[in-house]
Image (cartoon, helix red, strand yellow):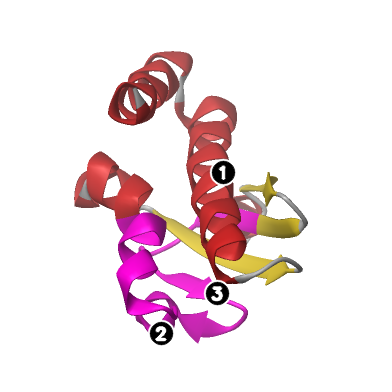
């Protein structure tokens, strides 16, 4: 019973900002689900910018992102700003989770993958 409670409490909260849009990501141990304001990730509008939210997840692959659940909340700004704030929050949240609960080496590997993509 004590192990269940510790597993459930393994979570980190990170934010991403773009202009006036603010996104908060709650990353915790889970099965690989991602939801934005309670809705599945594939419902993000506009469709063209949906790929931007998926980018951190696609770069890191199923083996790394399949172990965590990500809950996102976003407010303010326009469509584009919200999408970029979500993208930043997801990336920072996964890095923080790996740093806190896995190990520093895998956190550095993940961070290097994400940083190399944006250059």
In this view, the residue in front, 2 or 111, is 111
Q: Residues within 10 Å of mark 3 (few under 14, many from 20)?
A: some
Magenta-span inclusion, residue 79: no
Residue at position x 58%, y 48% in the image: 89
Instruction: Please report the bounds of the magenta region as a residue range.
Output: 25-54
Q: Which residue is mark 2?
A: 43
Q: Which mark is residue 36?
A: 3
Q: Secondary structure at mark 2?
A: helix
Left or right, 47 with respect to 11, comes to left
Q: Earlier in the sequence, mark 1 or mark 2?
A: 2
- Residue 109 visible? The answer is yes
CB atoms of marks 2 and 3 within 8 Å: yes
Indicate which disc, 1 or 3, sits on the residue closer to the N terminus: 3
Q: Quadrant of the C terminus?
A: top left
Residue drawn at x 44%, y 78% is 44
CA separation in Å, label 1 and label 2 = 21 Å
Foreground residue, 23 or 83?
Answer: 83
Determine the image quadrant of residue 22: bottom right
In the rendered structure, the answer to whether residue 73 lies left or right of residue 96 reads right
Q: CA distance from mark 2 to mark 3?
A: 9 Å
Pointer 2 local density, CA inside 10 Å: few below 14, some 14–19, many at least 20? few
Q: Which x, y percent locates residue 19?
A: 72, 50
Q: Looking at the image, is 90 positioned above or below residue 106?
A: below
Nearest to N terminus: mark 2 or mark 3: 3
Q: Is residue 32 above or below residue 56?
A: below
The label number, if any, that marks residue 93 in the structure image: 1
Residue at point 31%, 70% (across, down): 48
Question: Residue 103: x percent and y percent?
Answer: 46, 21
């Amino acid at each position: 019973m004590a192990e269940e409670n510790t597993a459930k409490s393994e979570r980190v909260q990170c934010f991403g900002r773009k202009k006036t849009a603010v996104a908060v990501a709650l990353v915790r141990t889970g099965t690989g689900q991602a939801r934005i304001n309670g809705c599945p990730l594939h419902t993000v509008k506009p469709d063209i910018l949906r790929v931007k939210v998926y980018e951190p997840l696609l770069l890191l692959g199923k083996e790394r992102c399949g172990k965590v659940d990500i809950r996102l909340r976003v407010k303010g700004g326009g469509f584009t700003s919200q999408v970029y704030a979500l993208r930043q929050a997801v990336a920072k949240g996964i890095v923080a989770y790996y740093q806190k609960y896995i190990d520093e080496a895998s956190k550095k590997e993940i961070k290097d993958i994400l940083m190399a993509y944006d250059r």
